[in-house]
């Protein structure tokens, strides 16, 4: 209340629950959202594992049976449009079925944001299928599954190296013919290591603006990095509000 007063922020009409115990605060928040007393859940100064434990509680949590996945939107000066990246924070080493679920979560969110047929680039270190590189095998399978309508409402191509995914000229130079190359809406990461490095590289090196959300629960979950700016956290709330439609 003191902070709000010092910043001339009117909190009349807001419900403030003072719960000093961290675990109790997390459980209370999740239960309130579960009981439809809230539309979005946001992580504050609590551990991610503590929050997710409550979210996945079988009695009063927010689980749906869907895989939870992290979705981030970036605005980068060197790319002509907003680009989404998944998954950089939830799934450590997703298998093929996990990647299908991650794509479906992300595509559903993009459609809510106004996209009609988002273009998905499945990333690998190279753009050729290599039997010794699992990411390229998964990428080829996902691309073919999309062609056979096993994954709908999007256009998937892969494997694509990062340069081909975001640069039409690079793809042309390598002789790659693709509807997605250079016009990507969503980058699917091969694993959390690659995703996390890309996320932080875009923020710290490219000075990208970012908003992120956890998808797959009954409501969107704002789960930002401790190093994210105030603007990123605010934008993540806006993204979650749009994703909750």
Image (spheres, grey):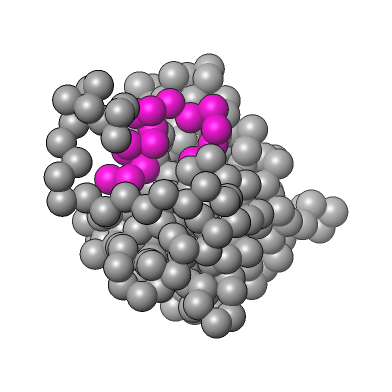
x, y percentage for residue 39?
Answer: 30, 63
x, y percentage for residue 124?
Answer: 66, 46
Examine the rendering and report whether any part of residue 183 can be seen. no
Which residue occupies the extreme right position in the image?
132
193 displayed left or right of 148: right
At x 22%, y 56%, the residue is: 114
Q: Height in image: 21 above or below 163? A: below
x, y percentage for residue 67?
Answer: 56, 69
Image quadrant where residue 69 sits: bottom right
Quadrant assignment for the N terminus: top left
Answer whether residue 181 is magenta in the image.
no
Quadrant assignment for the C terminus: bottom left
Comparing 157 with 85, the one in front is 85
Comparing 34 with 210, the one in front is 34
Comparing 220 with 38, the one in front is 38
Answer whether residue 229 is magenta in the image.
yes
Q: Height in image: 38 above or below 226? A: below
At x 65%, y 54%, the residue is: 49
Comparing 132 with 202, the one in front is 202
* Magenta stretch, residue numbers: 223-238
12 displayed left or right of 239: left
Q: Height in image: 168 above or below 155? A: above
The image shows a total of numbered marks equal to 0
x, y percentage for residue 227?
Answer: 54, 27
Q: Height in image: 149 above or below 161? A: below
Examine the rendering and report whether any part of residue 9 can be seen. yes
At x 44%, y 19%, the residue is: 207
At x 59%, y 74%, the residue is: 57
180 displayed left or right of 245: right
């Amino acid at each position: 209340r003191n902070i709000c007063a010092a910043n001339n922020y009117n909190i009349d009409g807001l419900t403030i629950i003072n719960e000093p115990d961290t675990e109790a605060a997390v459980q209370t928040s999740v239960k309130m959202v579960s009981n439809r007393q809230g539309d979005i859940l946001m992580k504050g100064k609590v551990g991610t594992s503590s929050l997710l434990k409550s979210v996945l509680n079988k009695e009063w949590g927010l689980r749906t049976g869907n895989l939870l996945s992290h979705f981030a939107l970036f605005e980068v000066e060197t790319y002509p449009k907003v680009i989404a990246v998944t998954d950089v924070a939830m799934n450590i080493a997703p298998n093929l079925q996990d990647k299908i679920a991650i794509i479906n979560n992300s595509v559903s969110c993009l459609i809510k944001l106004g996209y009609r047929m988002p273009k998905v680039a499945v990333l690998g270190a190279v753009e050729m299928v290599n039997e010794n590189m699992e990411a390229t095998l998964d990428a080829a399978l996902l691309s073919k599954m999309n062609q056979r309508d096993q994954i709908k409402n999007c256009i998937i191509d892969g494997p694509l190296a990062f340069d081909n995914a975001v640069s039409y000229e690079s793809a042309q130079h390598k002789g790659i013919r693709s509807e997605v190359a250079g016009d990507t809406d969503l980058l699917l990461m091969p694993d959390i290591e690659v995703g996390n490095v890309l996320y932080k590289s875009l923020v710290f090196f490219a000075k990208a603006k970012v908003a992120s959300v956890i998808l797959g629960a009954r409501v969107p979950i704002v789960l930002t990095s401790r190093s994210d700016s105030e603007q990123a956290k605010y934008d993540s709330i806006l993204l979650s509000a749009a994703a909750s439609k």
